[in-house]
Image (cartoon, rainbow, N blue to C red):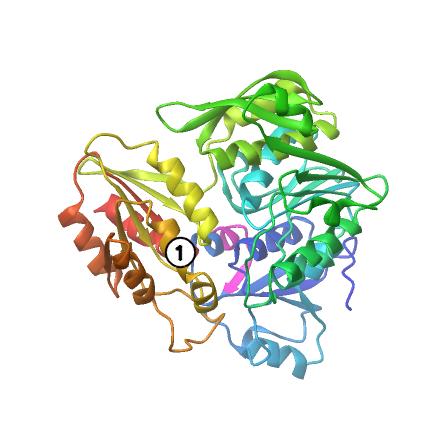
C-alpha cells in the first residue's frame, strides 16, 4: 500500500472530491501544503468551497483529469474499477489509495485519536465531542460527516494532539483506522449490501474495539445486547453509558442520564451521573431522546480527556445541530420545514418521535421520505413502513441509489406505499420532486411541521419550498 509522507507534500488527485469525507481530507492536505486537485459529477457547495481555496476541481470525471504529475490518486469505495480516472491512473502506473487508508494513515499523525462509531448518530456525537474539546481548550483537529456551524464546515484544523473523526463500518472502513480512543453508540442491522447479517456487523465492531491500545478508552452504549461479547478481554479501558428512568438505576452504568425532560421545542435536558453521583444538569438545544444518549457518550469521552463538566455543559448549549440533522430550513405559509438525514428505520423512528413533540392540536406531522439504496429498502421494508407510520401523512419519492447500486427491478417506494396503506395511513407516492412540492403546497396547513428525510437529495424539496 502506498504510504503518504505528510512531511513531504506531493500532488494528489481525489476522485469524487465533493463527498463529505473526501472534501474534508482534500482541504486538510491542501492546508498541509499538498497540491490538491479533484473531480466530481457536478458542482456543489462543498466543491465550490474547495475551489475558493484554490483547489482545482473538474467536472465531470474523465481520464484527462489524471496526469503523470500526480503522485497518488485517492478514491472511495463508491468508485468502481471502470471509472475513467481510475483506468487512467492504472495506465500511468500511478499509486491509488482508498479514502479509508488515507484517513488511517492520517490518524497516526496525532497523539489522541477519537474514532466515533455506531450504526447511527456518528455525526452528532462527533460534533458534540468536538465542541467539548474546543470548549476545554484542547484545540482538536476535526473531521465530521456533516456541516457543523461551530467549526464553519466539515473540517477544523487544530493541533496534532487531538483528532476527532467519524469511524464508519460500511465496507469495514473503520478496520483500517488507528484510533487511540473510541465511542460505539449502537449496533444494528445496516449496510446489508455489504454485511451478511447482524452477527457479521457485531464481529466487525468487536474487531474495531480490539484496535484500541492498552492506554486507550472505549466508551460504549451499555444497552447493546450481549455487551460482554464486544468488551471482554479488551486491552483498553471500557466505559459504559446509558439512560435511566430514575437515579437509583444510575449505578448500572459508568455515566448515566436520568430525570430527563423536553421543553416546548423538543429540546432535552437531564441530570448527568458519574458512578452513581450526580455531576449536574445538562441542557441541550437539539431534540429527542436519542440526542440525550449521543451527548452522554460524547461527554464520557470528553471527561476522560480531562474536560470539565462546566465545559461539557457549555459546549452542548452551543450545539444546535449539524446540517441535515433535524435541520430547520425555514417557514413558508405558516408551514415549519425541516430536513433530516435519517435513512434507517431506527433513525426515522427517533427523528419522528422527537418531531412529534413539536406539533399539537390540529397541527399535522408530514414526512417526505426518499429511501436510500434498493438493498436497504428491500431488507427493511416492513420496518420502514412501521417507522414512517408515526407521521400523520407520508409522501414518498423514488429510491435514491446514484451509482452505488443498479435497480434490481423488484423493489420500489411503491412497496412501502402499499404497506402503509394496509396500515390505514395517509400516504402518497410521486416520481418527481416537482409533483411532491406542488402537492405539499396544496395540502399542508399553517402550523403543520414538514420534514424531508433521507440520505439522498430530497433536501432540495425543502430548500425549494422555503425559497419559493
Q: Secondary structure at mark 1?
A: helix
| Camera-side residue of 438 and 269 | 269
Residue 353, position as x, y percentages in the image: 39, 39
Task: State left or right for residue 457 relative to residue 281.
Answer: left
Q: Compared to 297, does 95 lie above or below?
A: below
Pointer 1: residues within 10 angstroms few (<14), some, or many (20+)?
many
**How far across and down, in percent of the image, does residue 380 sit?**
45, 61
| Residue assigned mark 1 | 384
Would residue 119 be seen by someone viewing this image from the given angle? Answer: yes
Q: Could you say which quadrant of the image residue 129 lies in?
A: top right
Rendered position, 39 above or below 87: above
Quadrant of the snapshot with the N terminus: bottom right
- Residue 427 on the magenta span: no
Q: Quadrant of residue 256?
A: top right
Residue at 57% x, 75% y is: 80
Taking the image as shown, residue 335 lies to the left or right of residue 107, namely: left
Q: Nearer the viewer, residue 229 or 65?
A: 229
The x, y position of residue 14, in whole percent, is 60, 64
Number of marks in the image?
A: 1
The vertical placement of 329 against 264, above or below, is below
Residue 255 falls in image quadrant: top right
Q: Please give the name of the residue rendered at 71% of the width and 68% of the height, measured from the top-left corner.
A: 71
Say which residue appears at 56% left-offset and 34% top-offset: 293
**Which span of residues is magenta-colored?**
49-57
Q: Is residue 324 visible?
A: no
Q: Measuring from the top left, give residue 95's x and y in whole percent.
A: 72, 72
90 vs 343, nearest the viewer: 343
Amino acid at each position: 500500500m502506498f504510504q503518504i509522507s505528510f512531511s513531504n507534500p506531493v500532488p494528489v488527485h481525489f476522485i469524487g472530491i465533493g463527498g463529505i469525507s473526501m472534501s474534508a481530507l482534500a482541504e486538510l492536505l491542501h492546508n498541509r501544503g499538498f497540491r490538491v486537485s479533484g473531480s466530481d459529477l457536478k458542482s456543489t457547495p462543498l466543491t465550490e468551497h474547495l475551489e475558493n481555496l484554490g483547489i482545482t476541481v473538474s467536472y465531470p470525471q474523465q481520464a484527462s483529469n489524471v496526469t503523470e504529475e500526480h503522485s497518488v490518486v485517492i478514491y472511495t469505495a463508491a468508485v468502481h474499477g471502470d471509472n475513467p480516472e481510475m483506468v487512467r491512473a492504472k495506465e500511468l502506473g500511478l499509486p491509488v489509495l482508498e479514502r479509508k487508508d488515507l484517513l488511517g494513515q492520517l490518524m497516526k499523525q496525532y497523539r489522541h485519536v477519537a474514532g466515533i462509531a455506531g450504526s447511527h448518530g456518528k455525526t452528532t456525537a462527533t460534533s458534540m465531542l468536538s465542541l467539548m474539546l474546543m470548549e476545554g481548550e484542547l484545540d482538536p483537529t476535526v473531521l465530521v460527516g456533516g456541516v457543523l456551524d461551530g467549526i464553519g464546515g466539515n473540517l477544523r484544523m487544530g493541533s496534532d494532539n487531538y483528532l476527532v473523526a467519524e469511524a464508519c463500518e460500511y465496507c469495514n472502513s473503520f478496520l483500517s483506522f488507528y484510533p487511540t480512543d473510541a465511542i460505539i453508540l449502537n449496533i444494528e442491522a445496516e449496510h446489508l449490501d455489504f454485511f451478511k447479517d447482524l452477527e457479521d456487523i457485531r464481529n466487525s465492531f468487536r474487531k474495531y474495539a480490539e484496535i484500541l491500545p492498552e492506554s486507550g478508552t472505549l466508551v460504549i452504549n451499555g444497552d447493546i445486547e450481549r455487551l460482554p461479547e464486544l468488551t471482554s478481554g479488551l486491552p483498553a479501558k471500557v466505559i459504559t453509558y446509558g439512560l435511566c428512568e430514575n437515579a437509583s438505576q444510575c449505578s448500572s452504568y459508568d455515566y448515566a442520564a436520568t430525570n430527563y425532560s423536553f421543553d416546548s421545542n423538543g429540546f432535552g435536558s437531564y441530570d448527568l451521573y458519574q458512578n452513581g453521583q450526580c455531576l449536574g444538569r445538562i441542557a441541550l438545544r437539539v431534540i429527542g431522546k436519542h440526542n440525550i444518549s449521543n451527548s452522554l457518550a460524547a461527554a464520557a469521552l470528553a471527561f476522560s480527556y480531562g474536560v470539565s463538566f462546566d465545559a461539557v455543559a457549555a459546549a452542548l448549549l452551543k450545539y444546535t445541530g449539524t446540517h441535515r440533522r433535524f435541520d430547520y430550513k425555514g417557514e413558508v405559509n405558516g408551514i415549519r420545514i425541516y430536513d433530516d438525514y435519517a435513512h434507517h428505520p431506527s433513525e426515522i423512528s427517533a427523528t419522528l418521535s422527537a418531531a412529534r413533540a413539536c406539533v399539537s392540536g390540529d397541527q399535522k406531522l408530514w414526512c417526505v421520505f426518499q429511501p436510500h439504496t434498493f438493498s436497504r429498502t428491500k431488507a427493511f421494508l416492513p420496518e420502514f413502513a412501521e417507522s414512517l407510520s408515526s407521521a400523520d401523512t407520508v409522501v414518498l419519492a423514488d429510491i435514491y441509489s446514484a451509482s452505488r447500486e443498479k435497480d434490481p427491478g423488484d423493489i420500489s417506494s411503491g412497496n412501502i406505499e402499499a404497506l402503509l396503506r394496509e396500515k390505514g395511513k395517509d400516504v402518497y407516492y410521486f416520481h418527481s420532486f416537482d409533483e411532491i412540492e406542488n402537492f405539499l403546497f396544496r395540502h399542508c396547513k399553517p402550523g403543520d411541521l414538514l420534514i424531508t428525510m433521507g440520505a439522498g437529495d430530497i433536501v432540495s424539496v425543502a430548500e425549494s419550498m422555503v425559497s419559493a
